[in-house]
Image (tube, rainbow, N blue to C red):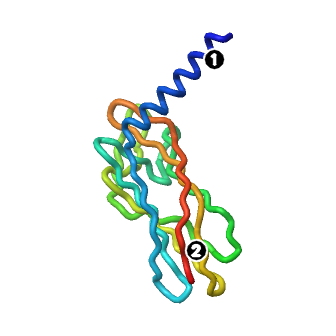
Amino acid sequence: MMKKYLLLTLAVIGFAGAWAQEKPVNWTFSAKKIADKTYEVYVTANITGDWHLYSQNVGVDGPVPTTFTFTKNPLLTLDGKPKEVGKVIKKKEEVWDGVVNYYEKNVSFVQVVKVRGTAKTNLAGKVEFMVCNDEKCLPPVEVDFSVNIGG
């Protein structure tokens, strides 16, 4: 029993070590006012090396799609879902038994938000994503974010 725990612990440390070594995605977060009390929030992935990041709509079962969870904020209203701005690649991959949608190099996810009132606030949440290259996939990762809006 102890041996299983030791192996599991080593596997988890190995995954964490692989992620720390490779860090295939660097995220940036910003907001831009586009109209009175309306903002675009940019969640941008800069993807390094030969890694690719899956779309919100992957196209098949298997890879973990990029998903957003926004923290409820009574001062903000989300206008739809995040739009993807980038060059989507649609490729048949045998390992997933179908055509998958993903991005290389960079992609921005743009969420439109409307502010109630004049107070300064923020859009907070987390993005969950998975990256793969031609040899392997890394386990899904969650990144927390908070972007200042309004005021």
Q: Position of residue 21 (x, y in %)?
A: 38, 35
Which is more foreground, mark 2 or mark 1?
A: 1
Q: Quadrant of the rendered structure where residue 107 is?
A: bottom left
Q: Is residue 138 or residue 28 the one in the foreground?
A: 28
Observer able to see residue 79? yes
Q: Is residue 139 left or right of residue 71?
A: left
Q: Is residue 20 left or right of residue 120?
A: left
Give the Cα separation between the discs numbered 2 and 1.
Answer: 46 Å
Q: How many marks?
A: 2
User: Element under label 2?
Assistant: strand
Q: For the point 59% across and 63% down, which residue is it?
A: 124
Q: Quadrant of the C terminus?
A: bottom right
User: Element under label 1?
Assistant: helix
Residue 5: image tag: 1
Q: Amino acid type of disc 1?
A: Tyr
Q: For the point 62% across and 14% down, which residue is it?
A: 4
According to the picture, the residue beneath numbered tag 2 turns out to be: 79
Position of 88 relative to 41 (above/below):
above
Position of 33 relative to 105 (above/below):
below
Q: Is residue 83 left or right of residue 70?
A: left
Position of 38 relative to 142 (above/below):
below
Q: For the point 54% across and 72% down, which residue is it?
A: 148
Q: Amino acid type of disc 2?
A: Asp
In the image, farthest residue toward the right = 74
Q: Position of residue 108 (x, y in %)?
A: 41, 62
Q: Is residue 151 or residue 39 the one in the foreground?
A: 151
Q: Quadrant of the rendered structure where residue 9 is?
A: top right
